[in-house]
Image (tube, rainbow, N blue to C red):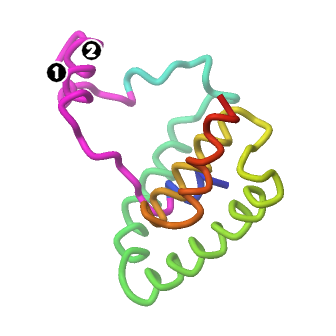
């Protein structure tokens, strides 16, 4: 659920000097010049995609995304994001802000931060972080 929320918000972390330094250190070529589709690992795919399948998915994305970001669809997205947050907060409250899967804790905390960096949900996550570690 947190990944769905972050994708729906189109969340991108702010570029800091540390991120720029990591990009320079880890990548063999300039970050902006990397063709990410070329480096998709074949083993990561559950099933190999057919060329026609990729063309259909890409064309659907290219043609529908501009419409979905305009009114009235952006209101629908906003409502869907609110609904997506409900199970995240429900799980947080039931687990007392320590979720069982290790990745889930970080993603839930990030989703709460993206929702409101100064909100109560994020502050409760921060308070339980020493117990989690």
Q: Quadrant of the C terminus?
A: top right
| Residue 110 percent across, percent down from the top left | 52, 49
* Residue 127 horizontal side relative to residue 61, left or right: right
Residue range of the region highlighted in magenta in the rendering: 8-37
Image quarter of residue 80? bottom right
In the image shown, does 30 or 121 lie closer to the viewer?
121
Whether tag 1 and tag 2 are in contact, CB under 8 A, the answer is: yes
| Tag shown at residue 96 | none
| Residue 78 percent across, percent down from the top left | 50, 78
Query: Which residue was labeled with disc 2?
Result: 27
- The residue under the point 19% across, 17% down is 24
Residue furthest to the right in view is 94
| Residue 50 percent across, percent down from the top left | 57, 35
Q: Is residue 15 magenta?
A: yes
- The residue under the point 35% across, 29% down is 36
Classify 68 as above or below 104: below
Query: Which residue was labeled with disc 1?
Result: 30
Classify 108 as above or below 65: above
- Element carrying mark 1: loop
């Amino acid at each position: 659920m947190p990944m769905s929320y972050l994708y729906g918000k189109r969340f991108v972390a702010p570029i800091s000097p540390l991120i720029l330094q990591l990009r320079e250190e880890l990548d063999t070529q300039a970050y902006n010049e990397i063709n990410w589709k070329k480096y998709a690992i074949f083993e990561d795919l559950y099933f190999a995609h057919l060329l026609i399948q990729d063309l259909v998915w890409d064309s659907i994305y290219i043609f529908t995304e501009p419409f979905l970001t305009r009114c009235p669809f952006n209101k629908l997205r906003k409502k869907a994001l609110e609904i997506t947050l409900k199970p995240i907060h429900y799980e947080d409250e039931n687990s007392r802000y320590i979720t069982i899967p290790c990745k889930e804790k970080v993603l839930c905390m990030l989703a709460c931060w993206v929702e409101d960096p100064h909100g109560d949900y994020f502050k409760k996550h921060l308070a339980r972080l020493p117990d989690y570690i």
